[in-house]
Image: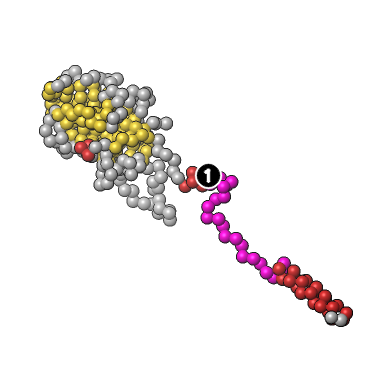
Amino acid sequence: MSRKEAIFLSLFVLVFAAGFIFYMKKIYKPKPAQAATQPAANQTASAAVTVATPPSPGYQTWTLPDVLKEISGNVLAGNDRMACIEDNEGIIYMYNLQSKKIDEEIQFAGKGDYEGIALVGDVYWVLRSDGFLFEVQPAKGGKPTVKTYDLPLTTENDTESLFYDSEHKRLLVGVKEKDLTEKDKKGVYAFDLDKKRMNKEAAFYIDGEKKDKDDKDEDDKGKKKKKKKKEVKPSELAIHPKTGEIYVLDGPDSELLIVEPSGKIKSIQKLDKDVFPQPEGMSFSSDGSLYISSEAGKKGQAVIAKIELQ
């Protein structure tokens, strides 16, 4: 190769190299890397999972056997036993919270719509929806002693709530539907345990209508909305052993209401319908833990849930 050809070749290589470098920097733009589908090991992936996953529920649940799929009332009978009733049979089922099994059955009557249960000493009281009250004294190894009381309430009133008010030594009986005298209220009546008689004058009333705090009087365009009445349907009531607050369970809407002694609804807590499709039973333990029972609904199984109130 001549000197002239060598110089020409060197110049060609330099020009080509310079052109390639210019192309790589100014013209060619590599396709950006795809975002990783999984977080890197040193990233805090758990934070994203926490946001997406709702917190664990603040209650403990017991799945009940099929015989209690229509459970309608529950009351604690000692630390580890729950006395339960259901809609169809006149039987008190003693459910053991430790073994998670029914370990005793107390038959006190035939078929009927039984809705409420209370415990006074060692005597059970059971309320039927047509206004009949049963006093059941269990007997070891034998049939219980049973007395019945025909209250001045009927199926028209639909009596579902029963609670032992230990402070006043009385049973409280609540209506779910029509009251004895009031049109827009639901009465709670006292049954005197000494006289074995119900007072026809209500001990107190529960407002018959409720309004959620998020309800608006106007629509998004500022026009007044026609308010749809939301009727309270008390399925059970109980008084908190420490605060004295009145708790009312609205089964059809799966809601827990706190009611003032005047009857005014103080607050409404919506219950998870997946867990409580039709809650009808409720009772407190002496330390203030709340036990709510729910029928199975169309799917799933009946449950009892222990709720630690804030």
Number of callouts: 1
Which residue is at a point 21% across and 30% down the rendered structure image? 93
Which residue is at a point 26% across and 44% down the rendered structure image? 297
How far across and down, in percent of the image, does residue 110 sit? 11, 33
The question of residue 38 being in magenta is answered with yes
How far across and down, in percent of the image, does residue 103 sit? 22, 28
Which residue is at a point 27% across and 29% down the rendered structure image? 96
Q: State whether residue 18 appears in this view.
A: yes
Q: State whether residue 204 appears in this view.
A: no
The question of residue 121 being in magenta is answered with no
Q: Nearer the viewer, residue 182 or 37?
A: 37
Mark 1 — residue? 47
- Quadrant of the image for the C terminus? top left
Main secondary structure type of the part rendered in magenta: loop
**Badge 1 amino acid:** Ala
Tell me which segment is drawn in magenta: 25-46
**As drawn, 96 above or below 45:** above
Residue 5 lies in what quarter of the image?
bottom right
Residue 202 lies in what quarter of the image?
top left
Q: Nearer the viewer, residue 70 or 283?
A: 70
Q: Helix, strand, or loop for circle 1?
A: helix
Q: Residue furthest top?
A: 194
Which residue is at a point 84% across and 80% down the rendered structure image? 1
Q: Nearer the viewer, residue 263 or 169?
A: 169
Left or right for 255, reference 110: right
How far across and down, in percent of the image, does residue 255 sit? 33, 39
